[in-house]
């Protein structure tokens, strides 16, 4: 593994441990408040330009097992059981395996609602610039 990939993997591992209210298994008992109350702009709007850091982070891929963690997080935010094989969740995990990147992963980790999560996906779940 190259030094940059080791660094990216270390960042992802540290980020997973720091997810607010989300353990490795992202269990509902540990979930944060999922109210739909407006949240300050923790997650940028879809058309905001990428920062230099985001553009760089889009070149670091998300490990496959983290895609499953994000799928569970999406289920919890959506009010479903974390292990439900909902079509949206299956599609999300597949998209993560294909195009998941560190910028998207960090953005979805900060999302407090499904709407914020979806904005992250619309903005960052794609090929790097």
Image (cartoon, rainbow, N blue to C red):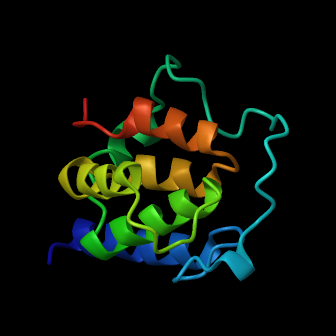
In the figure, is residue 115 to the left or right of 50? right
Given residues 116 and 54, the one toward you in this image is 116
Q: Residue furthest left?
A: 1
- Pick the quarter of the image with the N terminus: bottom left
On screen, 80 above or below 2? above
Q: Residue furthest right?
A: 37
Residue 33 horizontal/vertical position (percent) = 81, 60
In the figure, is residue 48 to the left or right of 124? right
The residue lying at 53 percent from left, 61 percent from top is 75
In the figure, is residue 109 to the left or right of 93? right
Which image quarter: residue 86? Answer: bottom left
The residue lying at 80 percent from left, 38 percent from top is 39
Given residues 103 and 68, the one toward you in this image is 68
Residue 30 horizontal/vertical position (percent) = 72, 79
- Pick the quarter of the image with the C terminus: top left
Which image quarter: residue 34? Answer: bottom right
Residue 123 horizontal/vertical position (percent) = 43, 30
On screen, 48 above or below 39? above
Residue 27 horizontal/vertical position (percent) = 62, 80
On screen, 7 above or below 27? above
Given residues 46 and 6, the one toward you in this image is 46
In the figure, is residue 62 to the left or right of 108? left
The residue lying at 39 percent from left, 48 percent from top is 88
How many numbered marks, from 0 up?
A: 0
The residue lying at 32 percent from left, 44 percent from top is 58
């Amino acid at each position: 593994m190259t030094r940059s990939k080791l660094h990216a993997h270390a960042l992802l591992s540290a980020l997973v441990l720091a997810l607010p209210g989300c353990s490795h298994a992202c269990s509902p008992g540990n979930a944060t408040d999922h109210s739909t109350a407006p949240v300050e702009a923790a997650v940028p709007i879809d058309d905001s330009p990428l920062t230099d850091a985001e553009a760089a982070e889009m070149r670091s891929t998300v490990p496959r097992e983290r895609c499953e963690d994000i799928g569970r997080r999406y289920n919890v935010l959506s009010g479903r059981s974390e292990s439900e094989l909902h079509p949206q969740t299956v599609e999300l995990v597949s998209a993560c395996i294909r195009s998941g990147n560190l910028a998207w992963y960090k953005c979805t980790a900060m999302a407090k609602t499904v709407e914020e999560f979806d904005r992250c996906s619309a903005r960052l779940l794609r090929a790097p610039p």
